[in-house]
Each structure stands twice: as structure tokens, then as C-alpha cells.
Image: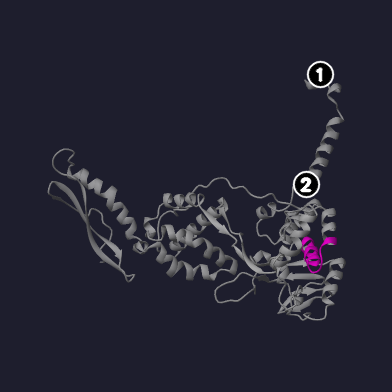
């Protein structure tokens, strides 16, 4: 029979007037292997003032040392330092399996956790460590932008000189960033538990953060949308038009290829899949995030499985898409619907900075962004009494709670409800009510 590795009593002995405890424990060697080591510590006095009996000393030894050792013996690998676990297990097994956006998220936030908690073993990290990490981050700043050197011609002398334009500025970390760091720490320990290298509660589970101040959500009115479409040039105009009518986000629009657009009255088979008549099949998205081993943007799978959906196309949308397809090149099945001069999808960031944002500022909508069109779409279909199932299907959500985050409150619709209730209530005014009626 194999020897039990848990330390029920250890070995309590007397030495120089003190109770001492000796026990065996698994430790991780420098090469990563687990070996058995004999350790000892002082428990309490056995002679003189404050001396404990053997029974009390044994109880003290178990509460203070052996109970923790026994818990750790169940997962000796938890002695690995957090930074080593992140490097050898968490990054290759979890981070590198994510989409580009997820990898960038961890690449930005992991250093905050590793730099502070990296030298601690997994079993040594406690909730107060993660709490202090997140709260300390709120007192720090980071640099936004960078100074730029410009070559300027002096109008008097005609000489050129270089001038440093100060563009870098310090910004405080937000509660949103602290929440990201907390979630990264939580993900590390959840993965450690999943691979059997950590036991116990997740130390990031009960971390508390200040209230988050979110930006106001905006949706366009029909008049605002019409003014915007008149002000935008191609292809920003077509992108905005399709975004507000289909709910596709900018990554899905840039990743849309002609083979996924069916403008005919018959079913179409593409890559072994049937696309309904007059429909857009949302199957891929375009990401411009740079990932190690890749240059520039690339096509990727969608953000979530629920984003894989078919969207209806009406005759007006079909007319817009046929106008785009009438260009001289990049109209093949594999070409993007919104192509740049190089044949790659258009750069949404450049379009936002150079076209969409200035147009929004000019029209009194400085908050305008690509995601505003999804909120607008959600608001419009809710105003037209679309069922929750249809709202989820159009937006590509798997949970109705996420769908409820989209769309603006329709005060007008609720006003009609109140007016109807008031009309019914007014059919019998308080003056017409008698005491006998109330009784």
C-alpha cells in the first residue's frame, strides 16, 4: 500500500524550551520537478511563561502549519511561480488559442499582473494581493501618443528648421483597465485549476473596484442618418448605410466578400453552404490587429458563434450593393465588397479618422463612431416592435441580456402607453365617484 502523503500530526518535539514541528512537504525544484523535502519550524514555548501543553501545541501546529500543508499537498505544482506558469502553461495553452483581439488583450494586460505578482507562487497569491494590484493601478498613469518632429520653413529667411511638436500626454488608468487586469488574473487561476495546478478559491473572485463611469450610448434619428449619408463620400456612405440596416459591425463589413452576398432570387451554394435569396451571409471578419507571426490584417472567424447569421437584403440595399459591384476591378468571389486600391479591405481606422469623425463633428454629433450604427439599428427595430428573438438574430447575440444593452429607451412608445391608461382611467373621473361606490 502506498504511503499517505498528508501530514496528520507531523513530528512535534521539544528543543531548548520550545515546541518544534518537523514535517515533510513536496517542493518544486529548479528544473520544475517535484521532490520531497523535510522542513521544521518553531510552534510555541514548552517551558516558562506562556508555555503550552503538548495537546495544545499539537493543535496550534495543525491550525498554523499542517492544515495549509495538507491542502497544498493535494496540488504540489502550485508551488510554481506565477510568472513561470504564465510563460510555460497559460500563454501557450490559453492565450495563443484566442483570436487576434483576445491575444492583444492579454499582451497588454498580462504585464500588469506578472510584474507585481510574478515572483509569488500560485498558492501564495491571496485576494488582497489582487485587490492591491487593481487599486494601485488606478493611481498610475500611462503615456498616450508621442512627440513628433516637424520640418518647418521660416517665411523670413527661407531656412528649414526642425521643431518638436509635443503630442505625448499622461493619462490615468481607468476603472475599466483595472477590471481588465482583474479578469486576466482570474483567467490565470481558472486555467491553473483546469490543468490541476491550483486548488482553492480564485483569489480574484471577490476583488472590489470603484463604480465604473460608462460613456453615454447614442443612436441616430432618421433625420440625422439622412443628413449623415448626404455628407459622407464613398465608401464610408455605403458602409454606414449597410451598417445601420443590417447591424453588421465594422469588422464584419470589412470582412464581407462577394461570394457571401446573394442578390439573386434563387438559393446559392457557396463552400458547401446554401445562402438564401436576397441575403448576406455573415461568416468572417477582417482584423487589422497585429499578431506575432502575421503582417497587417487578415480574415478571421467571427467574434462568437452567434454572429454567424444570414441577414435580409431589401431592393434598396441590393441597388447600393450592385452600384458597388459595378467598379472596374475587385469583383471576384474572394474579393472584399469594400476594397481599397490594393484589393485588401478598406482601412476602417483611416475612414473613421479622416471621414466619419469630421462629418460627425460638423453635424453636431462628436460622439459618432462605427459602433453607433449597431445601437441605431437596435433602437429602430425595437421601435418597430421586433420580437426579442428577431432582435437577437439581427444583432447576432446568444443572450437576450446582451441584446437589451443595445438600443435607446423609446420614451415616445411609453408615452403612448401612459396616454392609453390615462384615457381609460379618465372614463370615470374622481368627481363621479361616490362614497357608496367606494364602499
Image quarter (top left, top right, bottom left or bottom right) of the C terminus: top right
Q: Position of residue 435 (x, y in %)?
A: 80, 18
Q: Nearer the viewer, residue 84 or 419?
A: 84
Q: Is 236 within the magenta? A: yes
Residue at the location (71% across, 53% down)?
406
- Residue placed furthest toward the front: 157
Mark toward the start of the polypeptide (2 vs 1): 2
Q: Position of residue 27 (x, y in %)?
A: 30, 64
Foreground: disc 2 or disc 1: 2
Q: Which mark is residue 162?
A: none
Q: Which residues are magenta?
A: 230-245
Question: How dense is the environment of label 1, judged by Cα within 10 Å: few (below 14), some, or many (20 and up)?
Answer: few
- The part of the image, by quadrant, that contains residue 123 is bottom left
Image quarter (top left, top right, bottom left or bottom right) of the N terminus: bottom left
Q: Position of residue 264 (x, y in %)?
A: 84, 75
Say which residue label 1 marks. 436
Relative horizontal placement of residue 367, taking residue 231 as reference (left or right): left
Q: Main secondary structure of the magenta part?
A: helix
- Residue placed furthest toward the top: 435
Question: How dense is the environment of label 2, judged by Cα within 10 Å: few (below 14), some, or many (20 and up)?
Answer: few
How many numbered discs, if any? 2
Q: Which mark is residue 410?
A: 2
Secondary structure at badge 2 equals loop
Secondary structure at badge 1 equals helix
Q: Position of residue 235 (x, y in %)?
A: 79, 69
Amino acid at each position: 500500500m502506498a504511503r499517505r502523503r498528508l501530514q496528520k500530526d507531523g513530528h512535534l518535539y521539544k528543543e531548548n524550551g520550545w515546541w518544534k514541528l518537523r514535517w515533510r512537504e513536496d517542493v518544486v525544484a529548479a528544473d520544475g520537478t517535484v521532490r520531497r523535502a523535510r522542513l521544521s519550524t518553531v510552534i510555541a514555548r514548552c517551558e516558562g511563561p506562556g508555555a503550552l501543553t503538548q495537546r495544545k501545541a499539537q493543535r496550534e501546529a495543525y491550525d498554523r502549519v499542517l492544515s495549509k500543508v495538507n491542502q497544498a499537498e493535494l496540488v504540489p505544482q502550485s508551488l510554481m511561480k506565477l510568472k513561470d506558469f504564465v510563460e510555460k502553461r497559460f500563454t501557450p495553452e490559453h492565450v495563443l488559442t484566442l483570436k487576434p483581439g483576445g491575444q492583444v488583450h492579454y499582451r497588454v494586460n498580462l504585464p500588469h499582473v506578472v510584474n507585481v505578482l510574478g515572483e509569488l507562487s500560485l498558492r501564495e497569491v491571496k485576494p488582497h494581493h489582487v485587490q492591491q494590484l487593481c487599486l494601485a493601478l488606478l493611481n498610475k498613469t500611462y503615456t498616450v501618443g508621442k512627440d513628433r518632429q516637424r520640418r518647418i520653413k521660416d517665411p523670413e529667411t527661407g531656412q528649414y528648421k526642425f521643431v518638436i511638436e509635443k503630442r505625448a500626454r499622461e493619462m490615468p488608468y481607468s476603472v475599466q483597465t483595472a477590471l481588465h487586469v482583474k479578469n486576466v488574473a482570474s483567467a490565470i487561476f481558472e486555467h491553473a485549476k483546469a490543468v490541476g495546478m491550483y486548488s482553492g478559491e480564485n483569489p480574484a473572485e471577490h476583488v472590489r473596484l470603484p463604480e465604473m463611469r460608462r460613456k453615454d450610448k447614442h443612436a441616430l434619428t432618421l433625420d440625422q442618418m439622412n443628413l449623415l449619408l448626404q455628407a459622407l463620400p464613398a465608401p464610408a456612405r455605403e458602409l454606414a448605410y449597410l451598417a445601420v440596416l443590417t447591424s453588421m459591425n465594422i469588422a464584419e463589413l470589412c470582412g464581407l466578400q462577394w461570394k457571401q452576398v446573394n442578390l439573386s432570387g434563387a438559393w446559392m451554394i457557396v463552400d458547401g453552404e446554401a445562402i438564401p435569396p436576397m441575403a448576406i451571409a455573415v461568416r468572417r471578419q477582417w482584423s487589422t490587429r497585429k499578431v506575432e507571426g502575421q503582417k497587417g490584417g487578415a480574415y478571421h472567424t467571427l467574434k462568437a458563434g452567434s454572429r454567424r447569421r444570414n441577414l435580409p437584403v431589401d431592393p434598396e440595399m441590393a441597388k447600393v450593393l450592385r452600384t458597388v459591384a459595378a467598379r472596374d476591378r475587385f469583383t471576384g468571389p474572394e474579393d472584399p465588397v469594400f476594397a481599397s486600391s490594393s484589393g485588401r479591405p478598406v482601412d476602417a481606422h483611416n475612414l473613421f479618422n479622416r471621414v466619419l469623425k469630421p462629418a460627425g463633428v460638423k453635424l453636431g454629433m462628436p460622439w459618432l463612431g462605427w459602433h453607433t450604427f449597431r445601437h441605431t439599428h437596435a433602437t429602430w427595430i425595437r421601435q418597430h416592435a421586433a420580437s426579442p428573438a428577431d432582435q437577437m438574430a439581427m444583432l447576432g447575440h446568444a443572450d437576450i441580456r446582451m441584446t437589451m444593452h443595445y438600443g435607446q429607451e423609446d420614451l415616445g412608445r411609453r408615452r403612448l402607453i401612459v396616454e392609453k391608461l390615462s384615457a381609460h382611467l379618465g372614463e370615470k373621473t374622481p368627481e363621479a365617484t361616490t362614497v357608496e361606490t367606494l364602499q
